[in-house]
Image: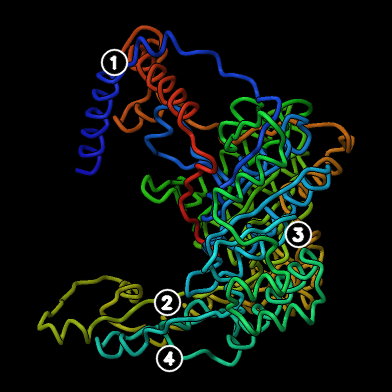
Amino acid sequence: MRRFIVGFFAVIGALVFLVVAVAAGIAYWAAPVTPPVPDTTLLTLNLNQSYPEAPPADTVGRIIGEEQLTLRDVLDALEKAAADPKVKGIFARMGDDEISVAQVQELRDAITAFRATGKFAIAYADTFGEFGPGIHSYYLASAFDEIWLQPQGLVGLTGLRSETPFIRGTLDKLAITPSFDHRSEYKSAMNSITDTAMTPAQREEMTEIVNSVYGQIAHGIAQGRKLGEAEMRDLIGRGPLLTEDALAAHLVDHIGYRDEAEAAARTRAGSGVEVLGPGTYLDRAGHPHQSGPVVALIYGTGLIQRGSSTGNPLTGGGLMGAETMVRAFDDAAKNKDVRAILFRIDSPGGSAIASETIWRAVQHARDRGKPVVVTMASVAGSGGYYVAAPADKIVAEPATLTGSIGVFAGKFVTTGLWQKLGISWDAVSLGDNAGMFSSMEDFSPEQHQRFENFLDATYGGFKDRVAKGRKLSADAVEAVAKGRVWTGEDAKTRNLVDALGGFSTALTLVKQAAKIPADQDVTLKLYPQPEGPREIIARLLGRTPSQDDTSTGTFAGLEQSLRMVRAVALQLRLASEPPGSLTMKPAQAP
């Protein structure tokens, strides 16, 4: 039924594309060549929302060839613009606090590198948090050389807080018994269902994480605003600050409205300035890292599962499928032109079996002579660290959440709930442990022992993979394991991470590992190769396009129509894109 529904809507969508293409034909043939970057350009960014790490799958934008911008795209735009004499500066809108601290740090580094070329960067916010926290956004703004704040705005420097819901009381009311266990005491993912408050180990862990991230933010803001760190911590304690108070404390430079801030940016850029968003700028200027030795770029994002990676067409999120990852690493390893692999991870973990499968793919690529460097995004914990362990080098942002070397598993026993509802169950089984994974009964003593053995074996295997990959003793791994989550900053001091930074730092290490000169550019090639419009539509229709299809058959006319639609879409964007017109779907982040 699901395939029928998906196929039905795919056919309807294809018909719509054909109708639109007829109307778009004239515009397509008359479409001008993409214009060059203007001689005086102001790059605009919308930093009010977080950016997806990887290109989203199964979206209408993919079908018509209109890609959604990712964090990599924005970083590419900043890197390209820094070396482009036509780009004079940046004007960025911000103020919302949805972006993760790790993404903030990567963007701060990119802004700092941009400014190091002598160009300006102006940040504008109507408020940094509206009766809510705004510390993430302000932390990002502090990397700019000017900060504008709208009158009546706030600077929501209120500190950091981590809250955890516990549903054990609800489960008790429903007569549902959680039968779970973990390895070891810091593996707190199950605590929300087995406890009613933080355990001492969980509280210790969360306190250390908050202290680490808070210190990073306070230090970064103090450095950016040229304030003492003690003074900065005092200001955070006094927040949120009203506009005049923020101005007096040198947290903002100007009070004004968006049009006034943008006018100031245009004036600094020079006469005849034209404004471009990062998508349009890259369309005209091109992406960096398109020449030189080939480095494979593989994204591993979302919960780890067996099978294929999948995307959510509504949220842009996804799942990291072991089969997809194996294919990506295998294809990259087999390609003689690929000198090394850059593995970007943004995952809280997931299936232990799938993690082992991906671990093997990473290790196998290294065995075949391809150096692998991992760059961690907002989170690379549990299975996310498992798959990173065999890499030659691991890079994380200071606020990346990683580690969580441990395991938990179990089941809910729902017999009491069914009794409350007046529903009875019966069964026929063969085998002493046939009901081991049933929610109708708890583990028997023998089954519970088998369950504990499984946890021991999985935990032991995880630690063994880390010990071999990181070249640590068993005792050293146990000291940093026990399910404990670390910030990237703390993980580096414990030899779980090699360097702090983002894409640019990882790329430097990739060149070193592949013996590519530091001053030579590289070609970043995405693996697995992204599907084109024909492939996406064919898959939705439950078929694979053949050579006949692509040349003279079913997909030929549709492909031409899609190209027309894309041309119209591109011209509309070039003609109507307002300053800072990025709209990004929120990504899961700590």
**Left or right: 127 with respect to 465?**
left
Which residue position is annotated with label 4? 196
Residue 20 found in image quarter: top left
Give the structural element (helix, strand or loop) at label 4: loop
Q: Nearer the viewer, residue 431 or 460?
A: 460
Report the amino acid beneath label 2. Answer: Gly
Alpha carbons under labels 2 and 1: distance apart: 57 Å
Q: Callout 3: 10 Å neighbours few (<14), some, many (20+)? A: some
Residue at the extreme left: 422
Q: Residues within 10 Å of mark 1 (few under 14, many from 20)?
A: few
Q: Is residue 588 above or below residue 240?
A: above
Q: 309 left or right of 417?
A: right
Q: Secondary structure at mark 2?
A: strand
Amino acid on which disc 4 is placed: Thr
Q: Quadrant of residue 234?
A: bottom right
- At x 65% / y 67%, what residue is drawn? 402
First reached walking from the N terminus: tag 3 or tag 1: 1
Question: Is mark 4 in CB contact (under 8 Å) with mark 2?
Answer: no
Q: Nearer the viewer, mark 4 or mark 2?
A: 4
Q: Earlier in the sequence, mark 4 or mark 2?
A: 4
Q: Which residue is mark 2?
A: 410
Q: Label 3, on which residue?
A: 469
Residues at marks 3 and 2, CA–CA distance in whole angstroms: 28 Å
Mark 4 to mark 1: distance in Å? 61 Å
- Asked if disc 3 and disc 2 are in contact, CB closer than 8 Å, the reply is no
* Residue 286 percent coordinates (x, y): 65, 27
Marks 3, 1: nearer the viewer: 1
| Upstream in sequence: badge 4 or badge 1 | 1
